Image (spheres, helix red, strand yellow):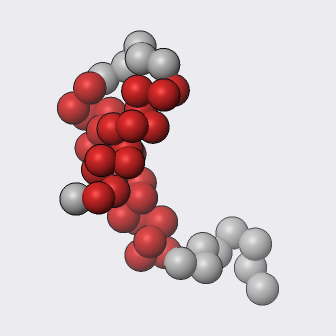
């Protein structure tokens, strides 16, 4: 088994997309809790 191969590539791609979308919307400089809440909302969409 290749250790560099993702087990669930589609899900990983969707999660990365959500992370980048949150970062694009609110930018940098916030506490982790702010990103967590925004990412929870992005996941629900």
Q: Residue 38: where, in percent of width, then height?
A: 33, 38
Q: Residue 43: where, in percent of width, then height?
A: 33, 56
Between 5 and 36, which is closer to the camera in this rendering?
Answer: 36
Residue under the point 41% across and 27% down: 34
Between 42 and 1, which is closer to the camera in this rendering?
Answer: 42
Residue under the point 74% across and 79% down: 2
In the rendered view, would you say 21 is above or below 6?
above
Residue 6 figure quarter: bottom right
Does residue 3 appear left or right of residue 31 in this picture? right
Q: Is residue 17 visible?
A: no
Q: Residue 23: where, in percent of width, then height?
A: 32, 33
Q: Residue 40: where, in percent of width, then height?
A: 38, 48
Between 6 and 42, which is closer to the camera in this rendering?
Answer: 42
In the rendered view, would you say 5 is above or below 33?
below
Q: Is residue 42 visible?
A: yes
Between 36 and 4, which is closer to the camera in this rendering?
Answer: 36
Residue 4 figure quarter: bottom right
Residue that extends furthest to the top in the rendered view of this protein: 29
Does residue 29 appear left or right of residue 2 in this picture? left
Does residue 43 appear left or right of residue 36 in this picture? left
């Amino acid at each position: 088994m290749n250790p560099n191969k993702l087990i669930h590539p589609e899900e990983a791609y969707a999660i990365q997309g959500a992370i980048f979308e949150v970062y694009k919307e609110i930018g940098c400089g916030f506490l982790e809790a702010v990103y967590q809440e925004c990412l929870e909302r992005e996941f629900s969409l």
